[in-house]
Image (spheres, grey):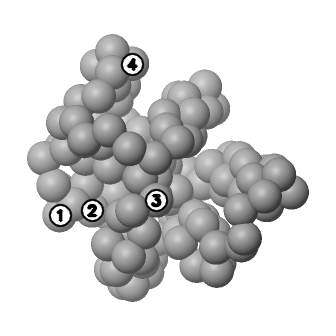
Amino acid sequence: MDATSGKHVTSVYLSARFGRKAELTGYIEELREHGINVTSRWLTTPTPTLNDEAWRWLAVTDKEDVHGADALVIFAEKEQGGGGGRHVEFGMALALDKLVIVVGEIENLFQRLPEVRVVGDWPSALALLSAGR
């Protein structure tokens, strides 16, 4: 159970710029060691050739994966780049009343909502996710 929200976390969606895929993939085993499943198929499925059909498939699977998670961790940063899908994933998680954790610098006003947890690094996010387990 997350100590600050009272929500029991057994699964998490990891959200970030695509360029951080290798970094986030490295966190999957750490989460499993804490009994937390990662729903982010974009981290474990080979990236298809990007055409309209592939983009549609990616959007559908990401939406399903956010919906299927107890929590979302977004790796925020001031650096611009990528398509910004992580912001949509963040919004979906908020709308679905998931535990939402921002790692890094706040990127937009919605990340300042009182129900959003903001931490400076991955170990702090992992501690929030695994608190009370």
Mark closer to the chain start, 1 or 4: 4
Mark closer to the chain start, 4 or 3: 3
The answer to whether residue 94 is left or right of residue 105 is: right
Residue type at numbered disc 3? Phe
Q: Is residue 110 above or below residue 13?
A: above
Task: Tell me the mark number nearer the camera, choosing from 3 and 1.
Answer: 3
Q: Secondary structure at mark 1?
A: helix
x and y percentages locating residue 94 in the rendered image: 53, 29
Q: Secondary structure at mark 4?
A: helix
Front residue of 95/36: it is: 95
Mark closer to the chain start, 4 or 2: 4
Q: Residue at x 15, y 55 (%)?
A: 121
Q: Which mark is residue 110?
A: 4
For disc 2, the marked residue is 126
Are the two marked residues, 3 and 1, in contact with CB atoms closer than 8 angstroms? Answer: no
Residue 78 shows in this picture: yes
